[in-house]
Image (cartoon, helix red, strand yellow):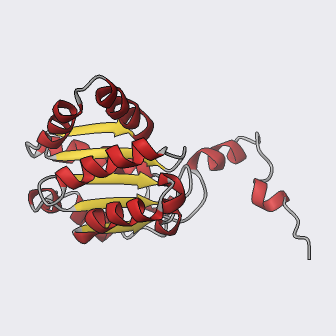
């Protein structure tokens, strides 16, 4: 199970409700937002496993891998085939949106995927960026707004705050004495 004590910003009742997968049956989405290492991917995988247990076809893909696959399919004239395949799974999990900016073609291809899945299939998206920064991620605030409009129309957003599990473990082991934030001094 998930260690809710390590992430007090999470509501265990809300996560358990998501684990019922009723939102998948309804074609809704879940978006996990938060800094690196707080459990976004862990939770998305756990929900994906629950969806599989309940009989839903599920696909997990990293955002960069997805973008590379869409770009390659576009270049080879197989975009329609690729979009169709990605639209046939009931739950599509896209991990790490925003770690690396997406170029204009990628943003357009991503929009096509989101538009194709809108109100037909569920998605889980994870990102370390707030929605306000998605214009920068996609290099175009208009495309970002259109993507968010479709994703968030039927979505639950889970904001996870807190310290990275990985950094916490390093600190416990004495391998890391201070985080970057603790060592930064403000200049007035």
Which sits in the foreground, 20 or 102?
Answer: 102
- Tell whether 159 sits left or right of 166: left
Q: Residue at x 77, y 54 (%)?
A: 180
Q: Is residue 34 visible?
A: no
Which sits in the foreground, 144 or 49?
Answer: 144
Image quadrant assignment for residue 142: bottom left
Q: Is the residue 182 above or below the residue 97 in the image?
A: below
Toward the bottom, the furthest residue is 188
Q: Residue at x 26, y 48 (%)?
A: 112
On the image, the x and y values in percent for residue 17 come to 22, 65
Q: Is residue 64 visible?
A: yes
Q: Residue at x 34, y 30 (%)?
A: 69
Image quadrant assignment for residue 163: bottom right
Q: Is the residue 139 above or below the residue 73 in the image?
A: below
Specify the quadrant that holds the C terminus: bottom right
Q: Residue at x 29, y 70 (%)?
A: 13
How many labels, in total? 0
On the image, the x and y values in percent for residue 129 come to 52, 59
- Tell whether 177 sits left or right of 82: right
On the image, the x and y values in percent for residue 173 come to 71, 40
Which sits in the foreground, 59 or 15?
Answer: 59
Q: Is the residue 35 above or below the residue 161 in the image?
A: above
On the image, the x and y values in percent for residue 68 come to 40, 31
- Tell whether 142 sits left or right of 172: left
């Amino acid at each position: 199970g998930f260690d809710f004590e390590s992430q007090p910003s999470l509501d265990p009742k809300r996560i358990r409700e998501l684990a019922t997968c009723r939102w998948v049956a309804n074609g809704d989405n879940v978006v996990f937002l938060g800094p690196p290492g707080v459990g976004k991917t862990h939770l998305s995988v756990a929900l994906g496993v629950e969806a599989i247990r309940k009989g839903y076809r599920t696909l997990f893909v990293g955002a960069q891998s997805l973008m590379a696959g869409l770009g390659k399919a576009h270049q080879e004239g197989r975009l329609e085939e690729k979009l169709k395949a990605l639209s046939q799974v009931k739950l599509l999990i896209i991990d790490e949106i925003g770690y690396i900016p997406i170029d204009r073609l990628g943003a357009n291809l991503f929009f096509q995927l989101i538009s194709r899945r809108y109100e037909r299939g569920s998605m889980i998206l994870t990102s370390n960026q707030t929605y306000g920064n998605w214009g920068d991620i996609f290099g175009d605030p208009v495309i970002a707004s259109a993507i968010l409009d479709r994703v968030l129309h039927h979505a639950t957003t889970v904001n996870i705050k807190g310290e990275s599990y990985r950094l916490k473990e390093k600190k416990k082991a004495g391998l890391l004495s201070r985080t970057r934030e603790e060592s930064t001094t403000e200049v007035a």
